[in-house]
Image (spheres, coloured by chain):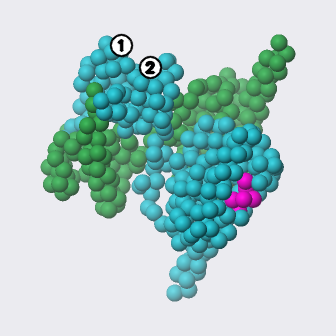
Chain colours: A cyan, B green
Amino acid sequence: MNPSRTASRVDLASAQIINLIQEKNLQPGDRLPNEQELSTLLNIGRGTLREAVKQLVTRNILVVRQGSGTYVCEHMGVPEDPLGLTFIKKGPELAISLVELRLMIEPEMAALAAERITSEQKKELTIRCNSLEQLLNAGENYINADALFHCYIAECCGNKVLQNLMPTIITAVSLSIRESGDGFRARSAYEHHCILEAICRNDSLGARYSMITHLNVTRDYFAQQEYLSRVVWNGK
Amino acid sequence: MNPSRTASRVDLASAQIINLIQEKNLQPGDRLPNEQELSTLLNIGRGTLREAVKQLVTRNILVVRQGSGTYVCEHMGVPEDPLGLTFIKKGPELAISLVELRLMIEPEMAALAAERITSEQKKELTIRCNSLEQLLNAGENYINADALFHCYIAECCGNKVLQNLMPTIITAVSLSIRESGDGFRARSAYEHHCILEAICRNDSLGARYSMITHLNVTRDYFAQQEYLSRVVWNGK
């Protein structure tokens, strides 16, 4: 088994394609030249080119639509699992690590959003908050709506790096809701409303504190669980 | 050009290999069964298996050593460019976005490290700080040493998710040093020393404030540049 045989040639071809995207400033959804054109343009053999395209599909940089062509992927190279969570053991320890990370990022993010949000964005954030609230009150699955609300706050900051970190936050949201056995539902609508209102009145400090209040419920839950398991263990 | 033809079969095979790594709790550097064994074990054809391995190599999950075999990659699936920086235009805007992210994460990270650092880790952090200081004083390239110091603080927190975010911080460090034309060198040794000392005396607040002091030099520089360019532009 030797899939690394032509690795360096394929890697080089991938780098050439990335350069092409950057130089031509291609955007998500833009179509690449067809195989023959690309092969001539970059002076790459067809076999190597195909391998390079496969690699870039895996890296969320390109997407191939059957019978149509090769396009720049809407994810623009942001991997689905940026922090390698696949290989970190699921459970309370990961949940605590993720909520620690969220508590570092999201209160400051809410504060920035309160400073920078536009009128249009206030409307959209309100819509997302309402959708979330409906699901919460109806006793339905609200994980996706919760993630969409938090991700939109990142968008309101106008910080592209922050936006690209959001796939991780989505994982964190869904993991903490699952690990806690739906225990946060009762308070969640009120907490999200406080965050929304603080951001919409451009109250930067208020947005920060509302976000801390919201996330600390999760942190507190897992820290308490961890403390209890330690006390019980020591008591044996 | 149709590299997505067998995508779903290959994706499925990749997922099976990931499952295998998780179930057997394989660690970085551990060797996978050979092609024949894997093919039988997972009931996958050789062609599909090879494609899946290529995909997992691209995703930093596997590494193929010629003539030796396939191993679990030391990066454990953490991509080299977790936040898709490749496709964000380089320049002051990206530098500001990155320092904003660093200011969210690193002060809290320093505070956590001050709480959790072990005696062994204090020694290692001191060594890294001294190496950095020597390079700074000698007028040499200190980008790598700077990154290693900041990454080790993440390690002292014992938060795996945080550690996996560090490849991004490394990019941020090198980008802001390059963009600023070496302007931070003079103060850098003193600032890093303050951070080291606060963490080593387990002074959580001190560590947070020292890190803010350090990073705000960078933020201030870029914000000032941006302000000046705006004022000059408006004045025209």
Q: Are circles 1 and 2 on residues that touch, CB within 8 Å?
A: yes
- Residue extending farthest bottom: A236
Tell me the quadrant of the picture where the C terminus of chain B can be found: top right
Q: Nearer the viewer, residue B10 or B121?
A: B10
B195 relative position to A48: left or right: right
Residue at (16, 47) in percent of width and height: B45
A202 relative position to A225: left or right: right
Q: What chain is tagged by disc 1?
A: A
Residue at (52, 21) in percent of width and height: A25
Q: Amino acid at mark 2?
A: Leu
Q: Quadrant of residue B92?
A: top right
On the image, the x and y values in percent for residue B81 come to: 49, 37
**Rendered image: mark on residue A20:** 2
On the image, the x and y values in percent for residue B191 come to: 73, 40
**Rendered image: mark on residue A41:** 1
Range covered by the magenta-colored residues? A191-196
